[in-house]
Image: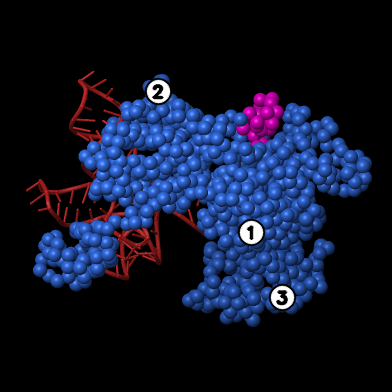
RNA sequence: GCGGGCGUGGUGGAAUGGUAGACACACCGGACUUAAAAUCCGGAGGGGGUAUCCCCGUGCGGGUUCAAGUCCCGCCGCCCGCACCA
């Protein structure tokens, strides 16, 4: 037995096959045990898994295996976020079909994931690109359309004129398409939208209930939804107006500053602007310039405020006889509020910049606390602090919040154009979710356009609307639209010639409900509500923080939409959320300045100094900063190579060690070596224990000596602590606990021979429990050890070891003794020793006697069983 | 600009207001070995002293407390998110 090294390359595939054959991780929906749903964000099938996946899935697997051991019915599925642009790009580059490329990638990545030994129920695997999945998405789209949750409207998009497609904001770089490099245009397109903004208030309020989410993510979502309370306010145009409208409506959150208003500004896209531009070449040119720079590019991030006077003036709504000039300004957004604002330069930085540039009045109306009204003035900085209103007639002396209420009531009572002049309104930054994509490789939007009957949903009996296989990507743009026949269909209502919608859905739709599909992946309906309601919400969801807003917000919305259409009975999809950090690695550069991959270098240590050399050329390599693994910096490490060299358990263990899971972890060779050594150390400990058992063959239970009892205590404490740490997702601390226990067991193993009767049982028990503690993290090693120890069945099926509470506490405690807060000694006392007795002991200690030097202490603080502080 | 986070040995990091540096990596010494690797044992925050010990020490400056890495106030630095949102 002893002397043999543990060989992961042999053992890992063996156990993977056994788990497979026994269907160890297949989960039944009708299992009566308490359900527990753990899910990691499913991957995009790019071709190969990366270390980020390894980290993500290692964490999820620990949680899954732990809760299984805790007796729960654990659902731990895996699938593929399989639609998306890269497949089309690959199709163009390699002349393959996007589906072929995607399915090959899935097969390759599935094999990689299997080699990690994850406790996944592969019978529930889904891929969003398969009609069996997206047909249900189409059905729900129709349900949502009928329920009024979906709408079709015009919207501005980034249009790449070369690739002939809509680009997401993230795909626009310096105003140019990320692939074509062509200047991006703003285009009005009719698109499908999920009306997420109808849920803005609910999505915002419900964040408070997501107590198991990182605060950071909740704040990000709160900001993204961007609720603000304000007033819609009508300004009457002065009578000499040259336009058809008689008033302009603005939105403001600061109606209290109305007496400080000095101008009105319209968006370049405001209807009134359009009317003015039609009659005025200068305004038209200004509007065109605004469009050239767009509203999404960095050109405007430099923040220069520009505008053009329209010639129009509006009546000041509260100052009789005064008028304000109306400008078109580049900083006013059409799709927030009303597309028009009033400017109060004294109390808004942007308005101040604008006013200084165009020489408009700056009249302060809010006096900061402690300022003198006679001398207070605004220079380059607007005052946005709260204070007391002044220079404002009937608002004078009020606080900002009070003034807002009074002025709102004032305007509500007056009328302009037959409407109340002012109306309190809540605005959100959250926009409706545009889901139309001019792309082939996505879920077809199940809609038919008929010249006679209009826009109609595809009848459910005709679902799925399947993507045609015979497509060509020779032409830029939407291959679905170019297909010769696919889009031509008969109208489901009148039977006449009609046209299919050729846009496909944003891939974020696919990932907005997959967690629900996993609960009944073969159902004929999108979900089986009873089943979904039993499993959902996901107890623990784990993934990257990059999805903090879009994916997680869309999923929260979609769950509400599914509830509204009867597919689930809940609002929130994810009860617990954990966002893990990235995997980083050192970067290396050759003398020529090229990035060098870690596999091409050798590191030489010289004391604390590390130097790198190129493996082949021998040239010195400079060691650069630690960065997120990326192909461009060549600092990636391939999981396959790690698994082949060290085994999956080592990779998993390393990923969980040292770094707190929410922080970035640095992948290092030395760290992996360490993890691998630990694996061998556990194996040696088990082997040695087995040798002892064979050699002495006398386990006499219940005859513990001091050593054995101390070991037992340590084992029970470790079992308890590791469980707590795993439940809190503090894997690094769980690992540290396991290291400590292992060290103790190794020491104990060396002492068994001295008193085998007393110690062997404690050792055997301790080693068995250690194996169970490492099982969620290094499952293959654990199974091997479990079997070697002659235990029944699989450790994967073994219940988490019980803890004897009596063994968690020591009878004796060590009390540190401080003098004036500095540690000067310690005493060991029986747990629960009363304070007077402790005090007596402390004062008789030689160190304390020496330090006190005959003086009486001023005070002695005794925290029972904890600490003593002598104050002199 | 707004919002959030972080700052502890050579390194990753640990520490319900209660012995700062657990655990690990790297390093040094010893044992084993013909030798190396592996393994085992030991050392180690900085400074002073033969030593018992003493002083300093968690980004910086104050404060609260018997006691502060932890709480409060004011700075500095780094990282992340949002960003003309009226």
Give x and y (percent) for residue A385: 53, 69
In terms of secondary structure, where does tag 1 sit? Answer: helix
The x and y percentages for residue A310 are 74, 60
Check the rendered structure and report the hue given to chain B.
red
Report the number of numbered marks: 3
x then y, percent, for residue A274: 78, 55
* Residue A816 visible within the image: no
Give how far apart the Cα atoms at labels 2 and 3 are.
Answer: 77 Å
Label 3 near label 2: C-beta < 8 Å? no
SS class of the residue under badge 2?
loop
Of residue A605 and residue B14, the one placed in the foreground of this image is B14
- A387 sits left or right of A819 in the view: right
Which residue is found at the position 61% from the left and 30% from the top? A107
Vertical comparison of A772 with A811: above or below: above
Q: Can residue A529 be seen in this view?
A: yes
Residue ID at (66%, 68%): A230
Label 2 or label 3, whichever comes before in sequence order: 3
Q: What stretch is highlighted in magenta?
A: A82-106
Residue under label 3, please give it: A411
**Who is closer to the viewer here, B42 or A82?**
B42
> Marks 3/1: CA distance?
31 Å
What residue appears at the point 40 percent right and 40 percent down from the top-left corner?
A: A771
Of discs 3 and 1, which sits in the foreground?
Answer: 1
Q: Where is residue A707 in the image (x, y as percent from the top left)?
A: 25, 47
Q: Name the residue under label 1.
A: A203
Say few, some or many: other residues with alpha carbon within 10 Å of mark 3 (under 14 / 14 to 19 / 20 or more).
many
Residue A755 is labelled as none
Chain to which the residue tagged by mark 2 belongs: A
- Shown in blue, the chain is A
Q: Is residue B73 above or below residue A793?
A: below
Q: Mark 2 points at which residue?
A: A615
- Cα separation, mark 1 vs mark 2, equals 55 Å
């Amino acid at each position: 037995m002893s002397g043999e090294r543990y060989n992961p390359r042999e053992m890992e595939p063996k156990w993977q096959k056994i788990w497979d054959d026994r269907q160890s991780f297949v989960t039944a929906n009708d299992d009566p045990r308490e359900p527990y749903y753990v899910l990691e964000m499913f991957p995009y099938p790019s071709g190969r898994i990366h270390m980020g996946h390894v980290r993500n899935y290692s964490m999820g697997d620990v949680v899954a295996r732990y809760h299984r051991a805790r007796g729960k019915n654990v659902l731990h599925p895996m699938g593929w976020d399989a639609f998306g642009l890269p497949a089309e790009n690959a199709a163009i580059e390699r002349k393959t079909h996007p589906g072929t490329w995607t399915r090959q990638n899935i097969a390759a990545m599935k094999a990689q994931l299997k080699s990690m030994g994850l406790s996944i129920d592969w019978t529930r695997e889904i891929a969003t690109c398969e009609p069996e999945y997206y047909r249900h998405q189409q059905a729900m789209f129709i349900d949502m359309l009928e329920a009024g949750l979906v709408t079709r409207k015009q919207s501005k998009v980034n249009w790449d004129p070369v690739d002939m497609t809509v680009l997401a904001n993230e795909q626009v770089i310096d105003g140019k398409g990320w692939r074509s490099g062509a200047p991006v245009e703003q285009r009005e397109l009719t698109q499908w939208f999920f009306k997420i903004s109808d849920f803005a208030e609910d999505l915002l309020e419900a964040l408070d209930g997501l107590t198991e989410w990182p605060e950071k993510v909740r704040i990000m979502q709160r900001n993204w939804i961007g609720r603000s309370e304000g007033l819609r306010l009508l300004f009457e145009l002065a009578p000499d107006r040259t336009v058809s409208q008689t008033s302009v409506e603005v939105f403001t959150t600061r109606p209290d500053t109305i007496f400080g208003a000095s101008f009105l500004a319209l968006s370049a896209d405001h209807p009134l602007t359009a009317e003015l531009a039609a009659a005025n070449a200068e305004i038209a040119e200004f509007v065109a310039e605004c469009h050239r720079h767009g509203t999404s590019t960095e050109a405007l991030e430099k923040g220069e405020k520009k505008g053009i006077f329209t010639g129009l003036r509006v009546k000041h709504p509260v100052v009789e006889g005064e008028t304000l000039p109306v400008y078109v300004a580049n900083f006013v957004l059409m799709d927030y509020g009303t597309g028009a604002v009033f400017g109060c330069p004294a109390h808004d930085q942007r308005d101040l910049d604008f006013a200084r540039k165009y020489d408009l009045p700056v009249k302060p109306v809010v006096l900061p606390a402690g300022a003198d009204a006679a001398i207070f003035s605004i220079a380059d900085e607007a005052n946005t602090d709260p204070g007391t209103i002044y220079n404002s007639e009937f608002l004078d002396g009020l606080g900002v919040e009070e003034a807002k209420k009074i002025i709102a009531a004032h305007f509500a009572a007056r009328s302009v154009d037959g409407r109340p002049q002012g109306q309190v309104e809540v605005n959100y930054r959250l926009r409706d979710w545009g889901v139309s994509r001019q792309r082939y490789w996505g879920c077809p939007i199940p809609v038919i356009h008929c010249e006679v009957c209009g826009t109609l949903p595809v009848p459910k009996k005709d679902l799925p609307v399947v993507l045609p296989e015979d497509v060509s990507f020779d032409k830029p743009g939407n291959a679905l639209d170019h297909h010769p026949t696919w889009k031509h269909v008969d109208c489901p209502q009148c039977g006449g010639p009609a046209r299919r919608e050729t846009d496909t859905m944003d891939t974020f739709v696919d990932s907005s409900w997959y967690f629900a599909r996993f609960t009944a992946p073969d159902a004929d309906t999108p979900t089986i509500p009873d089943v979904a309601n039993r499993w959902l919400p996901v107890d623990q969801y784990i993934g990257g923080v990059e999805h903090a807003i879009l994916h997680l917000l869309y999923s929260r919305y979609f769950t509400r939409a599914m509830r509204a259409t009867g597919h689930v009975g809940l609002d929130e999809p994810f009860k617990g959320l954990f966002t893990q950090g990235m995997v980083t690695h050192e970067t290396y550069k050759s003398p020529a300045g090229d990035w060098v991959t870690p596999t091409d270098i050798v590191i030489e240590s010289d004391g604390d100094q590390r130097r790198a050399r190129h493996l082949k050329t021998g040239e010195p390599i400079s060691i650069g900063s630690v960065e997120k693994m990326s192909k461009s910096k060549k600092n990636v490490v391939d999981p396959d190579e790690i698994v082949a060299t060290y085994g999956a358990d080592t990779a998993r263990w390393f990923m969980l060690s040292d770094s707190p899971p929410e922080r970035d972890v640095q992948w290092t060779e030395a760290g992996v070596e360490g993890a691998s050594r630990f694996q061998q150390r556990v194996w040696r400990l088990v082997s040695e224990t087995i040798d002892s058992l064979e050699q002495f063959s006398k386990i006499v239970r219940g005859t513990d000596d001091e050593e054995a009892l101390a070991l037992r205590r340590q084992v029970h404490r470790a079992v308890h602590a590791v469980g707590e740490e795993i439940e809190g997702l503090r894997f690094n601390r769980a690992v540290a606990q396991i290291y400590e226990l292992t060290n103790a067991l190794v020491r104990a193993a060396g002492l068994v021979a001295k008193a085998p009767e007393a110690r062997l049982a404690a050792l055997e028990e301790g080693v068995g429990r250690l194996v169970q503690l490492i099982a969620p993290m290094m499952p293959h090693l654990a199974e091997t050890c479990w079997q070697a120890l002659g235990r029944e069945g699989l450790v994967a099926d073994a219940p988490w070891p019980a803890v004897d509470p009596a063994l968690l506490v020591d009878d004796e405690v060590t009390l540190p003794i401080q003098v004036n807060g500095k540690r000067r000694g310690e005493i060991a006392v029986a747990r629960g020793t009363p304070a007077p007795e402790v005090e007596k002991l402390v004062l008789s200690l030689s160190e304390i006697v020496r330090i006190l030097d005959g003086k009486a202490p001023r005070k002695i603080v005794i925290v029972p069983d904890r600490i003593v502080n002598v104050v002199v």
